[in-house]
Amino acid sequence: MMISLEFSLGISEKHLMYQYNDDDQTLINERVTQYRGQTERYLKGELGEDEFRTLRLMNGLYIQTHAPMLRVAGPYGLLSSKQLRMLAHISRKYDKSYAHITTRQNIQFNWPDLKDVPNILADLASVQMHAIQTSGNCLRNTTTDHLAGVCIDEIEDPRPYCEIIRQWTVLHPEFAYLPRKFKIAVSGAKQDRAATQLHDIGLHLIKNDTGEIGFRVLVGGGLGRTPVIGKVIRPFLAKEHLLSYLEAIVRVYNLNGRRDNKYKARIKILVKESGIEQMTEWVEAEWLQIKDGMEVTDSRFNEIKAYFIPPAYEPDAEQDKSFDSNKAQSTAFATWVKYNTADHKIPGYRAAFVSLKAPDSPPGDITDKQLDAIADLADQYSFGEARNTHRQNIVLADIKQADLFDLWQKLDALALATPNIGTATDMICCPGLDFCGLANAGSIDIAKEINEALDDIDYLHDIGDIKINMSGCMNGCAHQSVGHIGILGVDKKGVEWYQLTLGGSSENEAALGERLGPALAKEQVTQAVSTILKIYIENRLEQEVFLDTVKRIGINPFKKAIY
Amino acid sequence: MKIIKDEQIIEDSWRHITDDEEIGSGDITVSLSRWNKEKKVLLAHQGKVGVRIAPTDKIEEISANLNDISLVAVELPVFTDGRAFSHARLLRSRYGYKGEIRAIGKYIPDQVFYLHRVGVNAFELENTEELPLALSTLNDFTVEYQVSSN
């Protein structure tokens, strides 16, 4: 049954996000009907377990340790206040009143009932949302920079391109049964905040010598069991060829990717085994055959770009004096501004991070009340829009500096203002053994322990910029191999052990972490992390961030202190 | 046996013969390797001739002979093997094939809509009882984001 709830739609909302037209809406409504039929056939025994598995995965539904898990697509991370309220509603009605933000800007529910999922999808469809292709061996949700359109280092706003890719991927008839999952990320800024080098396809919006906008195209990046950094397959692709080039890559992969072993089925293995030269040759040959006639026209770009025009910023926002005086009067506020806000391209505005890394809550989790409250705050302060981040937080991207103090107080009252963005407790963490059917080891409880060990906020801030990523198994959902400190849970004869790596990065200078030594027992992990941080503090040069110290002194000093 | 062809359930008499089976009479399909080896004999056959394309086959190998081939059967040995989708797409869009493209193998009715969109116009399902369901799925979606080959 379709639920119709009356929510206030901020007038400005339609200028910040793509809005479905009748065709978009029809398509997701029809998808709900299709999936409802498939669920009914499965429950009646007319559809086999394996067949239904593949079909439900392509609607975001996993079967986990305790219950199904439903992954809802956050289209390149963007959410309207209306959508946030619907997510809160779904978490209350069908789940345990909380949701989880993922590293690919999606939203997960951990406790829905399989038979309720068609109704959840119908509720989502009523606010232009879906769970299409959030799992399965198909084209997944496209991700991007959570500061798209507002950051100060942007070459071109990636969101319109993401929307064009979103539409191309959704229900693509040729590429629904790929050898393995396929993920695309787009970055339009100088600083890569979307881990594009670790995606099956990474797209960097760039300008060529003549000032024309296009893409540097990377292929074959990925995490998981065999982490690989993507390689450049085309240094410059004119933007009108975006879809034909994607189609060429995915077709070459569909026809040539390995299907004999699921651990060798990602495109990164095809690139590795054939070599980037061969891969480039295949893709370019395929592309030459299809590029004419598949161009994205200027009018199409303009049509989509019109949904992302800047909102009505106040021209005199910078005149405000209260921001500086509030910072001078409240150290806590000044600290929050320093860590949890980012520069904005419009003077007098900042982007504010809503920290989902409070010490006593699992990283990335958010309650129904918090979702509703963020929706209200988005309406009040940020043109009715919010974004999920790759590091499992939420951003309110357009906050007037005069509003930051109020916003901070309200977030603080909701336990959403822990000033730890970019610090050691802003961990990426998978659900681990507590929820996930794949996990070999717990991760949430270790995150909690690390939080307890780093409860001195001044010490946390002194350590500064560091990314700790922790996964409960080799699948690497929490991107441990590119964490500055990576923690990987493994199972050895029924006991949880943890492998530590140092020096990984998913940013511009992407790198895979180096293994520190033999796996540690669970009770040693937090102590080891503390020791690593201590060695850093002892060895760092002035202003040197953790990653640079590791690069400079190597892993031996850390190794020596731990083993 | 019954199949779906051009959006109708019809009776069909094509035989898929193995590489060492007698050609016999009537309409037959052969594997790509048999086609490559016995092209002359097959072209002289009284009935119509089709070629089966396995996932690892290269579709371009028959591109020069498409006028002589009445049916191309794209094979899904398991329903998760998506290469048949690209084969059908290439046959229609790159090689302009106008004849019958038939999906054979172990696929499920829920895949018929996508197969149809990439250019498959005939569906042979192992479980013929599912043909009406498969036929009905052709109406699952009335809108689409990508170009179709059907």
Image: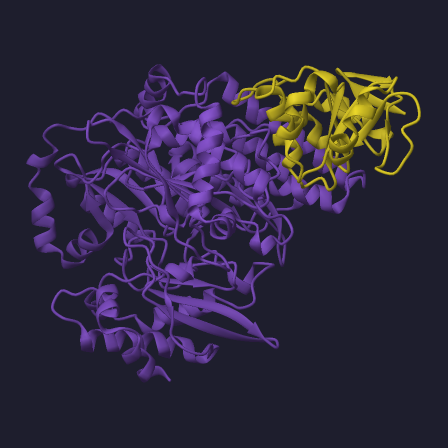
Chain colours: A purple, B yellow
The picture quadrant where one finds residue A52 is top right
Can you give x and y, in whole percent of width and height, for residue B92 in the image?
Answer: 62, 20
Looking at the picture, tell me which residue is in the foreground, A329 or B97.
Answer: B97
The picture quadrant where one finds residue A37 is top right
Looking at the picture, tell me which residue is in the foreground, A214 or A105.
Answer: A214
Looking at the picture, tell me which residue is in the foreground, B74 or A85.
Answer: B74
Q: In which quadrant is the N terminus of chain A drawn?
A: top right
Q: Residue furthest front?
A: B40
Can you give x and y, in whole percent of width and height, for residue A261 in the image?
Answer: 63, 54
- The relative height of residue A44 versus residue B39 in the rendered view (above or below) is below
Q: In which quadrant is the C terminus of chain A drawn?
A: bottom left
The picture quadrant where one finds residue A58 is top right
Can you give x and y, in whole percent of width and height, for residue A44 in the image?
Answer: 80, 39
The answer to whether residue B118 is visible is no
| Number of marks drawn | 0
Can you give x and y, in whole percent of width and height, for residue B77 in the image?
Answer: 74, 40
- The relative height of residue A166 versus residue A56 in the rendered view (above or below) is above
Looking at the picture, tell me which residue is in the foreground, A284 or A514.
Answer: A284
Identity of the residue drawn at 42% across and 57% down: A479
Horizontal relation, residue A122 to residue A160: left or right: right
Identity of the residue drawn at 61% across and 75% down: A494
- The relative height of residue A199 versus residue A237 in the rendered view (above or below) is below
Identity of the residue drawn at 19% across and 78% down: A538
- The relative height of residue A411 versus residue A296 in the rendered view (above or below) is below
Horizontal relation, residue A396 to residue A264: left or right: left
The answer to whether residue A130 is visible is yes
Identity of the residue drawn at 9% across and 55% down: A329
